[in-house]
Every structure is written in C-alpha cells, then in structure tokens.
Amino acid sequence: MHFPSSRLRRLRQTAALRSLLAETSLRVENFIAPLFIVPGKGIEKEISSLPGQYQLSIDKAISKAKHFEQLGIKSLLLFGIPEYKDETGSAALKADGIIQRAVRELKKDCPEMCLISDLCFCEYTSHGHCGIIKDRQLENDTSLDLLVRQAETHADAGIDMIAPSGMLDGCVAALRRGLDEKGYMNLPIMSYSAKFASGFYGPFREAVDSTPQFGDRQAYQMAYTNVNEALREVALDIEEGADIVMVKPALAYLDVIRAIKDKFAHPTAAYNVSGEYSMIKLAAKQGLIDGEKLMLEVLTSIKRAGADIIISYFAEEFASLRKT
Ligand code: PBG
C-alpha cells in the first residue's frame, strides 16, 4: 500500500479536533422565526400541518416573542390571518389590521426585536392569489399600487423591515419609491427575489388558508428548472434597491443560494419552508430519522451554501438546543 503523507482521518479522530476544524457554524443571531398571528385573545392553536407551530393571537404572540428574546432570537417574520377575506384583500390595508396592530403591540413589549412583515395579499384575498385578479390572471401593476399602500401601513405601525413575497415585477422599485416619498427611506427591504413555485409550501397554505381557489402560482413564481433566471431576478432586485435578497425554498435550491452569493456578494437569506420542516418533523415522529440530527444537518447545509440569514420554523428548537 502506498499512501501520500496526508491522512485526512488524522483530524477526524476526536470530537475536539472535529469541532476545531468545523468550517461552518450556525449562529442563533442569523435566524428569523416566522410567526402566524390571528385575531382574538388567548389563542394558541397548533397548526396540524406544522407540528410545534401555532396560530397566535397578539397577546400570545407577545409572550412567544419574549421567550424568543430569552433564547437569543432577535428577528421575527410576521404573517397575518385577517378577520375577513375579499376580492382585493382590503383587510391588508387597514391601519388597525391584524399585522398593523400586532406590530404596535409587539413594539411596546419587545422594542429591541426586529419585526419583519411578509408583504403579500394571498392571506387576505378570497381567491388566494397574491394581488388583484383580472381575467383569471394576477395583474402586476395595479397589485403593486396596493402593495405600496400595504407597506405604508406597516411602516406607520413601526415595522423594522418589509419582505415582499408576491414575485411581482418591479415591486422593490415601487416599494422603495413609495416608502421614500413618505419619509421611510431608512426602512430596509428583504425581497423574496428568487421564489420558486414549489410543492414545499403545502403545509404553510393550511396555516394561513391561502390555497389559490383556481389555477396556481406558476405565472408569477419561478420554475424550479431555472437558475440563470434566478440570477436575473436577483440582479433586478438589487438594482431596484433590495437590501437583502432571498431564495425560497432553501433545501432543494442550495445551488441557487450558492450561485447568488458567489455572483452578487449581497446579504442573502434563505427560507427553510414549511414542507422542509414538516417532512423532518413527521419522519422523526415515525421513528425513521433522528429529528434533531437532521435539523442541524439541513440548517448547516443552508449556511454552507452561502446563506447569511436563515428563516426557519426550527429557529426556536435550534436556539433552545444552544441554551441547554
Ligand atoms: C406568500 C408566502 C408563502 C410562503 C411565505 N410567503 C406561500 C406561497 O407563496 O404560496 C410560504 C412559506 C412556507 O411554506 O413556509 N405570502
């Protein structure tokens, strides 16, 4: 047997050596935890499709946020489930709407927390699409006008960052212009730049009841076959003023994260979505896999692929693990 003198197993012999050599590490500070907020009081309803995740009324969301703060989680991504849905998603524009109220209340008790709103209409429209529908198609530019109005109400409520998720063309430019005109030039935008039409959103749509009543989202979200197109989306968003770009989902798109990070060196987030979370949770429940091990492996892979920020339903579990 003739070996070169490098034996890579030398440095794998003990836990101390292995951790000394770790090239990638996860930090609680890089996580954003999603929260689902519903009207009412005292509500803490587990979402059956997302084990361990809850629909929370504002009072319960505040307790949750305080708990997160103790764990070191400093950013929340807020999703609102409104009192009513209609054709235009008008509940999203109310100064006292679910998100607007949640932001005001959360800010009182957790002023240090970075509150980010998912800016879209699909939770608010009766048809479940991400804006105004005409001839069964999502109308881009009229939807943009409404999106800007929605953003202004979030800004008025005191939001720290907005995250447009509808994949409308020109949305970052429209939002930037609208916010700047109102004096919100310092409000950052995290754009869902490369959001793919994905089967991995299944459990989320149950959480917020936003399954499209007809058609699907392929006419606005991206095809999972395309990476060059993802780079074009990101290039445009950066040009339009996006402060952070995002890839979503994460796990089946690690190559896209890497390509974006390498090309643009821009702050990059990845959304470890509902289906990615629930697959692990349910397989662990069945005894097929070790849930904690898989969580760490998957989250690390997202970081290794180049994500600076990870949005994940695992944020709380990961942070708790760090504390124990
Ligand atoms: C749209 C939105 C969706 C998700 C986040 N924002 C759903 C969709 O596009 O269908 C999915 C999140 C997840 O699956 O965890 N407002």
Image (tube, grey):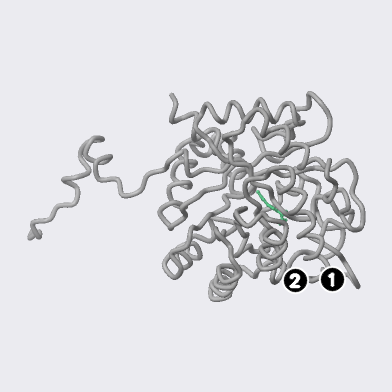
- To which residue does mark 2 refer? 219
| Tag 2–tag 1 contact (CB < 8 Å) | yes
Q: Which of marks 2 and 1 is nearer the N terminus?
A: 1
Front-most of 87 and 227?
87
Name the quadrant containing residue 151: bottom right
Where is residue 225 drawn, in percent x and y?
A: 59, 72
- What residue sits 53% from the left and 35% below the top? 73
Where is residue 118 drawn, in percent x and y?
A: 69, 50
- To which residue does mark 1 refer? 137
Q: In this view, does 43 lie to the left or right of 73?
A: right
Where is residue 79 drawn, in percent x and y?
A: 72, 44
Type of amino acid under label 1: Gln
Q: Can residue 141 be seen in this view?
A: yes
- Name above or below for residue 213 compared with residue 133: above
Q: Is residue 98 left or right of residue 292?
A: right
Q: Is mark 2 on a helix, strand or loop?
A: loop
Q: Is residue 195 left or right of residue 255?
A: right
Q: What element carries label 1?
A: strand
